[in-house]
Image: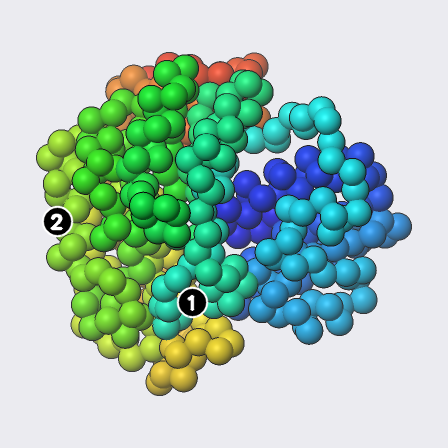
Amino acid sequence: MSLGCRLNIAESESIRALLADETDVVVVNSCAVTAEAVRQTRQAIRRARRARPDARLFVTGCAAEIERDQLGAMPEVDGLVPNARKLDPRVWNVPPRRLPVPPRHTRAFIAVQNGCDHACTFCVIPQGRGRSRSLSVAQVLREVERHLDQGAPEVVLTGVDVTSWGHDLPGSPALGSLVDAILQTFPQLQRLRMSSLDGVEIDPLLFELFASESRVMPHLHLSLQHGHDLILKRMKRRHLRADAMRLVEQLHARRPDIAIGADLIAGFPTEDEAMHAANRSIVRELGIVHGHVFPYSPRPGTPAARMPQLDKGVIKARAAELRAEVREVRGAWLSGLLGTELTVLAESDGTGHAGNFARVALPAGTAPGTLVSVTPTAIREGLLQ
C-alpha cells in the first residue's frame, strides 16, 4: 500500500517484487509531507489490519522515520523498516527473485534520485530521506530497459529532488544529459515523462528536450510552492516569482501545447491577504492546470513551525480558494482541448492520460497499457469524454 509521492509508487513496486512470494506480509509505504499525510498513514494502517488480521504488517517510508515512536506504538504494526533500507532484500529476510514480477501500473516509475540537500523551512522530508543520492546513468538505463522489456509504453523519472540528479556523481552531470541518454539509447521508448521539477535547476539541454523532443511529454510540473517573493524567501526557496514566469513563457513560446502543473502551499506562516492574492494570481498567470494545493501544516523540527502561525480556518479557506482558481483555469483548458485529437495511454480503470496529462474516458474494452487516439467532444466531472 503506497501513500504520497511518485517516488513512493516506484519504491512500492520494487517492494512488491521483493515480497511477491510472501503471502502473509502487508507493507504500508508511508508519507509524512503534511500532518494530513501522517493521519492518512495511520488510517491506512488500520484499514490494512482490518483487511488482513492474520498478516504481518510492516510500515516503511517517511512517516516511519519522522513519526517512528507514534507509528511504532500502534497495536496494528508488527515492525518498522528504515526508509533507507526498504529496497534491501536482507531487511525483509527474503531471497532475491529470479523471475520479474509484472508491474501494476501502465506507466513505469523509475526513481533516479533520492534524498535532498536543500533546507526549505517548511519541509520535513530530508529528515526522512537523507542527503541527495543519484543513480548512475548505467543504472538508470538498466532500469529503463527492464521496464521496456516488460512492455511499458511510458517511463516516468521521479525522485525527491529530481533536478538535483547528478550533483553527487563524478563530473556533476545535469539532468538533461540523463534524459538525452535515455532517448538516444532507447529509440523504441514512446513516452518519457518527468515528475515534479525545481524550475531554477532545469539545465539548457533539459529545456531544449522539453521544447523540441516529441517523446518528452508536454507536461511540466513545477515545485513552485508560492506566488509571492517574500513568502518564497521565508520558505528558503531558490526561485522568485519572475523566474517561474520567465521559464513558462519561454517554454510556451517553443511548445505551445505544454501543460503546466505546480505544487502550491496555502496559509504559510506570516502570509497576509496580499500574499495570498499573489498566490492565487500566479495560477492564472502561469496557466496552472494540474495544481496540487496543500494547506500548510507545521512539521516537527522545521523552522517554519516556529514562525507566527495562521488560524487553521484561514488556512483551510485559502486552500479552497486556490483549488477553485485551479479548477477554473483547468476547466478553460479542457474546453480548449475539445475536438482535438489526443494520444492517450489507457489505464486499468477505463480512463487514460494524454501526453499533456489530461485525463480522458476511453471506450469500453480498451486494453490497459495501449496508446489510443481519442478526439473528445465533452467534459463530464473534469473528465474529457
Mark 1 burial class by Cα count in 10 Å: few <14, some 14-19, many 20+: many
Tell me which corner region of the image, top left, top right, bottom left or bottom right, holds residue 186.
top left
- Numbered tag placed on residue 230 in the rendering: none
Residue contact between numbered discs 1 and 2, judged by CB atoms under 8 Å: no
Question: Residue 294: percent from the left, percent from the top?
Answer: 41, 61
Tell me which corner region of the image, top left, top right, bottom left or bottom right, holds residue 176.
top left
Q: Nearer the viewer, residue 310 or 146?
A: 146
Q: Is residue 345 above or below residue 250?
A: above
Q: Secondary structure at mark 2?
A: helix
Q: Secondary structure at mark 1?
A: loop
Residue for point 23% across, 43% down? 203
Question: Residue 97: percent from the left, percent from the top?
Answer: 73, 31
Name the quarter where the C terminus is drawn: top left
Q: With 284 as the anchor, is 261 left or right in this view?
A: right
Image colouring: rainbow
Q: Name the residue that disc number 2 marks.
A: 246
Of all residues shown, which one is farthest toward the right? 54
Query: Which residue type does callout 1 highlight?
Result: Cys
Q: Is residue 202 above or below residue 369?
A: below
Query: Could you tell me how many numbered marks the image carries?
Result: 2
Is residue 200 visible from the viewing direction of this image?
Answer: yes
Question: Residue 366: percent from the left, percent from the top?
Answer: 53, 15
Query: Which residue type does callout 2 highlight?
Result: Arg
Q: With 358 as the anchor, is 37 left or right in this view?
A: right
Residue for point 55% across, 43% down? 9
Residue for point 20% across, 66% down? 228
Q: Name the residue that disc number 1 marks.
A: 123
Is residue 326 visible from the viewing direction of this image?
Answer: no
Of all residues shown, which one is farthest toward the front? 170
Alpha-carbon span between mark 1 and mark 2: 26 Å
Q: With 173 as the anchor, is 230 left or right in this view?
A: left
Question: Residue 272: percent from the left, percent from the top?
Answer: 24, 77
